[in-house]
Image (cartoon, rainbow, N blue to C red):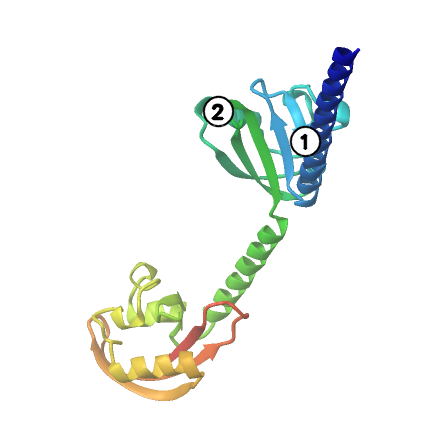
């Protein structure tokens, strides 16, 4: 009887330990599920045969998944994205080199798709993980900026006076068509270069540098600054420079508008 009682006590202890581990595992699974559901990133876990092992709620916005799809090949599942990702997933599985590309759905939603090997705690490759981050807002902002830039360039090119837009390092961001025509230069030797390096350094004037830096730091515009110089292609020029700082959104680099009048 005493031996049986001891065995029962040991069995109860083992059962309690197992129960504690099950409860701990359940908590961890719940934590993981809530984490994946609340980071708003669609995630698909595939095994080494590209069968669906698990997926998050946001993944159903990309693939038409239901709970009973676990264990099915991803190739059997219809997707709203227009790009094919299975070849990329297979390549990642074979080479262990992560893959990243932008994709979009038929509803014009844009995602950054990342495919990475699925590694176990023992560092064994046991499939791949696909994640989808919604970048639609970023794409829309970039498109709006591009449209605004094209509009601004169109306006700049209608101005008869030669005009430059400089960044905070005094590099040329934009030049008007009239600037290229008047000074007989090309965008290749103008854009991205500091203004004081243009041509034969005809704009490398200490006082002009001081005025431009004051404009950047203290928003002090200047008008009718006189410059005389012999230009290689167009000869002697007497010009008046006018410059103002362009208002830009908070956090954006400061810009200078430099207008050249004969």
Mark 2 residue crowding within 10 angstroms, few (<14) / some (14–19) / many (20+)? some
Residue at the spot of label 2: 91
In-front residue for pair 197/209: 209
Q: Which mark is residue 138?
A: none
Percent from the top left, x then y, of residue 222? 40, 87
| Mark 1 secondary-structure assignment | strand
Does the image show residue 261? no
Percent from the top left, x then y, of residue 15? 74, 22
Residue at the spot of label 1: 55
- For the residues bearing labels 2 and 1, Cβ distance under 8 angstroms: no
Does the image show residue 251? yes
| Mark 2 secondary-structure assignment | helix
Q: Quadrant of residue 105?
A: top right
Q: Quadrant of residue 243?
A: bottom left
Residue appearing at x 52%, y 72% in the figure: 248
Mark nearest the camera among 2 and 1 is 1
Between the residue at mark 2 and the residue at mark 1, the CA separation in whole angstroms equals 21 Å
Q: Is residue 257 above or below residue 54?
A: below
């Amino acid at each position: 009887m005493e031996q049986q009682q001891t065995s029962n006590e040991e069995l109860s202890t083992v059962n309690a330990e197992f129960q504690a581990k099950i409860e701990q595992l359940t908590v961890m699974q719940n934590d993981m599920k809530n984490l994946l559901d609340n980071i708003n990133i669609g995630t698909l876990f595939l095994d080494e045969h590209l069968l669906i092992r698990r997926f998050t709620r946001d993944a159903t916005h990309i693939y038409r998944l239901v709970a009973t799809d676990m264990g099915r090949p991803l190739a059997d599942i219809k997707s709203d994205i227009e790009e094919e990702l299975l070849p990329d997933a297979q390549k990642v599985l074979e080479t262990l080199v992560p893959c990243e590309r932008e994709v979009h759905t038929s509803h014009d939603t844009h995602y950054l798709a990342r495919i990475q090997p699925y590694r176990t705690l023992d560092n064994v490759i046991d499939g791949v993980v696909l994640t989808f981050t919604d970048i639609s807002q970023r794409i829309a902002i970039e498109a709006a900026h591009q449209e605004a830039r094209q509009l601004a360039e169109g306006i700049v090119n209608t101005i008869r006076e030669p005009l430059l837009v400089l960044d905070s390092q005094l590099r040329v961001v934009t030049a008007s068509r009239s600037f290229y025509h008047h000074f007989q230069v090309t965008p290749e030797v103008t854009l991205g270069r500091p203004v004081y390096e243009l041509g034969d350094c005809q704009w490398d004037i200490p006082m002009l540098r001081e005025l431009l830096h004051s404009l950047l730091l203290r928003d002090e515009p200047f008008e009718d600054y006189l410059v005389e110089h012999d230009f290689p292609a167009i000869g002697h020029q007497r010009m008046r420079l006018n410059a103002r700082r362009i208002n830009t959104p908070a956090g954006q680099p400061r810009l200078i508008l430099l207008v050249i009048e004969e």
